Image (cartoon, rainbow, N blue to C red):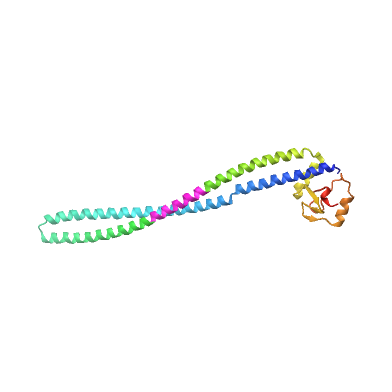
Amino acid sequence: MKAAPEDQVILLDVQRLDNDVTRIEHRITSLRKGDQLTELGTKAAALRGELAAATGLVEDAERELARLESDTAIAQARVERDTTLLQNVANAKDAAGLQSELDSLQRRIGDLETSELEVMEQLDGLRARVGDIEAQLADADAARAGLAAERDAEIARLEADRVSAVQSRADVAAKVPDDLLALYDRQRARYGFGASLLQGGVSTASGVTLTASDLQTIRAAAPDDVVLCPDSDAILVRTPESGL
């Protein structure tokens, strides 16, 4: 293929802009994957699980405390009833029976009140644990929301940069003859690079110094010959700095 040297040089700008578009798209993809957001989301999910479990323990303790308080209230009501009966009973045997029941009820109330205190202490600790988890979850959610907002703003900026780079690429590519641009696009799709500057005997696409034999072949080519890099298969663009 033949192409004017100045048209081949334009391909370097096309390649640069394609590189910019690719870099921007990779960055957008990386941001959308959101590794940090995923990590924070996993942390928040774990905290929600802990919160559900801790809340369940609080509810269990509250039910147990309510049961103990109810049992205590029933026992105290029976004490009041038996006390009233004892004050009015005349039979010594009945009085002894009522007194025995009162003593038993007082012991029962004492045991219930001890249990109530133990459950209340447990409940204080469980409620504190729930509060601690809720605070951690709020922090995680706030951090995630803040990070998501930063990510969305960065993606919006990058999308604008990508649109600008794509437009610039189209404007520059429009200056390249169709057949030369088609070859560039084909080589880039296959090998990752469509054009490579030969600079001081080194192909910038591959970073490899060309062999003496390859350089000799390139020197023998006409200025308007389209030459492919032997290492990267990109169009090798020759300029005064190529070292030929």
Specify whether residue 228 is in view. Answer: no
- Drawn side of residue 162 relative to residue 101, left or right: right
On whether residue 137 falls in the magenta region, the answer is yes
On whether residue 86 falls in the magenta region, the answer is no
Q: Which residues are magenta?
A: 126-143
Residue 155 place in picture, x, y as percent: 61, 44
- The secondary structure making up most of the magenta span is helix
- Drawn side of residue 117 relative to residue 33, left or right: left
Total numbered labels: 0
Residue 129 place in picture, x, y as percent: 41, 55
Q: Quadrant of residue 14?
A: top right
Q: Determine the residue positioned at 79% across, 56% down.
A: 208
Residue 89 place in picture, x, y as percent: 11, 56
- Drawn side of residue 176 relative to residue 64, left or right: right
Q: Determine the residue positioned at 76% across, 50% down.
A: 191
Closer to us: 52 or 21: 21
- Drawn side of residue 25 relative to residue 144, left or right: right
Specify whether residue 23 is in view. Answer: yes
Q: Quadrant of residue 157?
A: top right
In the depicted structure, whether residue 133 falls above or below residue 175 = below
Closer to us: 53 or 29: 29
Closer to us: 120 or 79: 120
Residue 172 place in picture, x, y as percent: 75, 39
